[in-house]
Image (tube, rainbow, N blue to C red):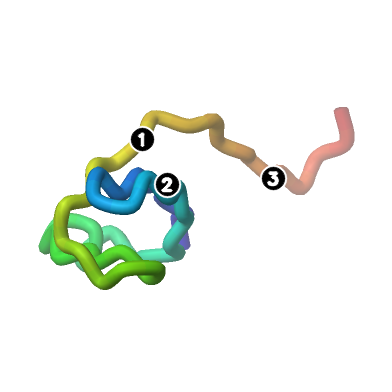
Amino acid sequence: MPTYEYHCEKCQVIFEIVQSMAEHERGKVVCPHCQSKQVVQQFSRFFAKTSKKS
């Protein structure tokens, strides 16, 4: 499952959440630090793991 990075606009905490695509589309993310719903998704890097050696 993908990991999404969010920024809380209320307490300024940046946090990550592992969500399924369906959970992410619902968009009901709450800050784990202050329980605020004022969160914005951040653009972040991604990591792809393949079975072939580079």
The disc, 1 or 2, on the residue closer to the chain's N-terminal end is 2
Q: Are marks 1 and 2 in contact (CB under 8 Å)?
A: yes
Q: Nearer the viewer, residue 33 or 49?
A: 33
Residue 28 appears left or right of 48? left
Residue hosting label 3: 49
Q: Amino acid at mark 1?
A: Gln
Residue hosting label 1: 42
Quarter-of-image position of residue 23: bottom left
User: Any mark on residue 5, and which?
Assistant: 2
Residue 21, position in %: x, y?
Answer: 28, 59
Q: Check disc 1: other Cα within 10 Å, few if <14, some if 14-19, many if 20+.
A: few
Q: Check disc 2: other Cα within 10 Å, few if <14, some if 14-19, many if 20+.
A: some
User: Residue placed at 15% from the left, 61% from the top?
Assistant: 37
Compared to 3, does 48 lie above or below? above
Calculate the distance from the C-alpha at mark 1 to the C-alpha at mark 2.
5 Å
User: Any mark on residue 33, and which?
Assistant: none
The disc, 3 or 1, on the residue closer to the chain's N-terminal end is 1
Q: Are marks 3 and 2 in contact (CB under 8 Å)?
A: no
